[in-house]
């Protein structure tokens, strides 16, 4: 049974039936500002992209995906002017605390 977590979903969420020997692909769709965190198949964490295919289905399987907020990228100025570097450090500090 494919289940997605908060922050996204799996195409075809819920329990589904397939003929023995068939194959099916599930796509993982993250909501805006989220990204895929972990993917587990039958309780084992796997590394994959944005989809997973079960080939030659011969038993029940469980597919779970969790999502996390996408991390913002910040550019810190590389100037020697103390004020600009200090301001960038303060902005980074306060962003992490929100």
Image (cartoon, rainbow, N blue to C red):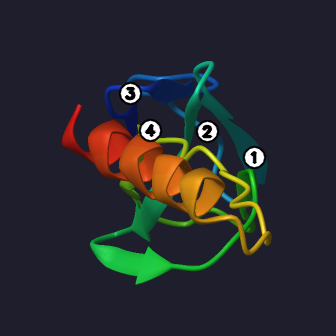
The crowd level at tag 4 (other Cα within 10 Å; few <14, some 14-19, many 20+) is some
Q: CA distance from mark 2 to mark 4?
A: 33 Å
| Residue occupying the point 59% across, 44% down | 72
Which of the two discs, 4 and 3, sits closer to the camera? 4
State the SS at label 4: strand
Label disc, if present, on residue 24 of the rendered structure: 1
Q: CA distance from mark 4 to mark 3?
A: 27 Å
Mark 3 vs mark 1: which is more N-terminal? 3
Question: 61 or 56: nearer the eye?
Answer: 61
The crowd level at tag 3 (other Cα within 10 Å; few <14, some 14-19, many 20+) is few
Q: Quadrant of the C terminus?
A: top left
Which of the two discs, 1 and 4, sits closer to the camera? 4
- Whether residue 23 sits left or right of residue 63 in the image: it is right
Label disc, if present, on residue 69 of the rendered structure: 4
The residue tagged 3 is 15
Mark 2 vs mark 1: which is more N-terminal? 2
């Amino acid at each position: 049974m494919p289940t997605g977590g908060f922050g996204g979903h799996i195409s075809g969420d819920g329990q589904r039936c397939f003929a023995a020997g068939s194959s099916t692909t599930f796509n993982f769709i993250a909501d805006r500002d989220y990204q895929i965190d972990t993917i587990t198949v039958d309780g084992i964490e796997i590394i994959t992209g944005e989809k997973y295919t079960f080939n030659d289905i011969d038993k029940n399987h469980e597919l779970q995906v969790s999502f996390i907020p996408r991390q913002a990228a910040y550019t810190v100025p590389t100037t020697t002017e103390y004020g600009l570097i200090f301001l960038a450090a303060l902005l980074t500090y306060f962003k992490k605390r929100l």
